[in-house]
Structure formats: C-alpha cells, structure tokens
Amino acid sequence: MCMLLGHYCLNRQALLLQYSVLNTVRPALARTLILRTEGHSRGILAGFAHINTGTDRVTQPRGTGIRHYGVRMEPGKGLIFRQLFESISSTYTYLLGDKETKEAVLIDPVLETVDRDVKLIEELGLTLKVAANTHCHADHITGTGLLKKKLYGCKSAISRLSGANADILFSEGDHITFGKHALTVRETPGHTDGCVTFVLGDQSMAFTGDALLIRGCGRTDFQQGCSKRLYESVHQKIFTLPGHCLLYPAHDYKGQTVSTVEEEKKFNPRLTKTLDEFVHIMANLNLPKPAQIDIAVPANLVCGLHEV
Ligand SMILES: N[C@@H](CCC(=O)N[C@@H](CSS)C(=O)NCC(=O)O)C(=O)O
C-alpha cells in the first residue's frame, strides 16, 4: 500500500510548493500526442488475443505555442492505445485498454497531467485497473498515487526491486492483465535497480521506461545506475524481442515517438557498441542533474502520494 509522505521524512512543504508551481504552469505545458496508425496483424502468443499494430504516421508539431497534437493510435482489433506527452520532464505516458471489457492500464503517469489522463480515461469509457511505473523516476513525480485517489479501484504498481511502496509489487515474468490483453514484466536494471520493460502479450509493443530511449538509453550516474548492467539488460531482454516489436520509451527529448527493436539494434549510437565502449560513453555523458531529482525520488518511493 502506498503510505503517506510523512512516513518518509520528506520536506512536505517543499513538495507542496513544487506541486503548486507545476500545477500553475501545467495547462500551458501539458501536451497530448496521439498517434494514428493503420493496423495490420502480427503473430500471437498462446493465451493472448490478436492485436494489430501498424506503421506509424506521426504528426509532428508545427510552429510554437500550446498544441494538442492531433495523432491517434488505434492498433486494430481489441486494443485501445494512446501515447501522451508531458513537456516539463519530456515524459511519455501510455494508456492501453481492452475494447470489449474497457479495462485499462496506464504506464508512467505524471503528477501534473493526472487530470488530463483521468479525462481521457473517462471519455473513452475505460476503467483504470492499474497505474504502473516502469521505475522510480528521478525527473518527475509519478501520478500513480493521485490516480488512486481520483479513480476508485485503481491500483498502483512498481517493481519489487525498486524499493518503493505500491499496491502491486511485480517481478520478472509477472503479468498485468486488462481484459484479454496482458503486459509481461521483464526486469531491465541498469538505469536503476528496479527498472522494467513491459511487453505486450504478442510482443508487438514494449514499453522500455528509461532502459532504452530512442537512439539512446537511460543515464547510469545516480540512483543505482550501472552501465554494464544496463548494457546486459538491453541486449538480453529488449534486443531479443522480435525485430518488428515497437519500442516506446518513457522519455524523448527530440520529438521522436516510437522505434523498433530492429532499428535500435542497427542505429542506437550507444548500444551498438561493445560493452567496453558503452561503459566509456556512459561515463562521459556529463549530463546535468535532473531539476526535480531531490523531490521526485523520495515522492516516488511512495507512489507520489501526498496530500494535495
Ligand atoms: N533535463 C532533464 C533530465 C534529463 C535526463 O537526465 N534524463 C534522463 C532520464 S530521466 S532521470 C536520462 O537518462 N537521460 C539520458 C540521456 O542521454 O539524455 C530534467 O532536468 O529533468
């Protein structure tokens, strides 16, 4: 169970101030990316329904200012899918739902865009079963705790190895089911100990969190970062998926929205290198510390749940 923030010696005042500032700018900064595809069938695994995915036609932003990206993804039979974007931390949130039962799962919600997510879930007539984190994020506060308060019956989830509290603590091989669909958990540590990749039942889509970014990967210089572990995770748990498997990361800083296993195996500038070269690259990224790290990590250890 998510516990109150006070149990974790947080500076609650600082958190509330941060939340209130972010909440003020939220309407101007939160944008919605919806992708539109034409579906075509992929193979299936025993026990899972047919899911169609397709070739993405991405509408890119034009000009400046507030924009609701007009893209929508409807991957064929049975699956509802939306890719949503939060522009302060450049985080993608993913909504997956079952067309028949209307059960849904949300991956990596962000606190500042919870109202947007709730509105979309309600508009689509979905029941949110699980709000799941790919890991304990360092750059934003998760929306899973607030979603539990707003949507009755919704359960928070994160990997057991993250050390965080949640209703569901999952491990390698566990399934998160919604209607006839399921996400399988693959542990992909390296950016943090508790990082996972969620793989859709027919292996047509995978949600890689910060383990694999498009043409990049998560940094390994804080939390429990370890570049050797990350390299092994990606090669053993992500690059072993089918080449056509669509890869959806937790972040992108360049407007990229989706990749495939085949593309990343060919073109990822870090992960196509040898292990030694990769370790050297990761040790020399020299990235600035994420702006929200000091409030985000402790908050995310309790699903971002606090009195707002
Ligand atoms: N400027 C951002 C943080 C950017 C950043 O460090 N991103 C992380 C993932 S979120 S912890 C990362 O791993 N980046 C890898 C890379 O190569 O960019 C902020 O202040 O929030």
Image (tube, rainbow, N blue to C red):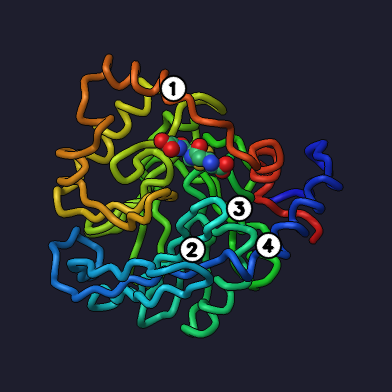
Q: Which residue is mark 1?
A: 226
Mark 3 and mark 4 in contact (Cβ < 8 Å)?
A: no
Give the Cα separation between the discs numbered 4 and 1.
31 Å
Q: Quadrant of residue 26?
A: bottom right
Mark 4 and mark 2 in contact (Cβ < 8 Å)?
A: no
Q: Which residue is mark 4?
A: 146
Q: Amino acid at mark 1?
A: Cys
Label placed on residue 139: none
Picture coordinates of residue 55, whole percent (x, y): 18, 66
Taking the image as shown, residue 140 lies to the left or right of residue 266, namely: right
Q: Amino acid at mark 3?
A: Thr
Q: Amino acid at mark 4?
A: Leu
Sequence-earlier tag: 2 or 3:
2
| Ligand 1 has an atom within 8 Å of the beta carbon of the residue at disc 4 | no
Picture coordinates of residue 103, whole percent (x, y): 45, 74
- Please, what secondary structure does the residue beneath circle 2 have? strand
Q: Amino acid at mark 2?
A: Leu
Picture coordinates of residue 259, whole percent (x, y): 25, 52
Give the Cα separation between the discs numbered 3 and 1.
23 Å
Give the Cα separation between the discs numbered 1 and 2.
28 Å
Q: Which residue is mark 2?
A: 106
- 1 or 2: mark nearer the eye: 1
Give the Cα separation between the discs numbered 2 and 3.
11 Å
Q: Which residue is mark 3?
A: 142
Sequence-earlier tag: 1 or 2:
2
Mark 3 and mark 2 in contact (Cβ < 8 Å)?
A: no
- What residue do we see at 34% from left, 21% from top? 281
Give the Cα separation between the discs numbered 2 and 4.
13 Å
Q: Residue furthest front?
A: 63
Sequence-earlier tag: 4 or 1:
4
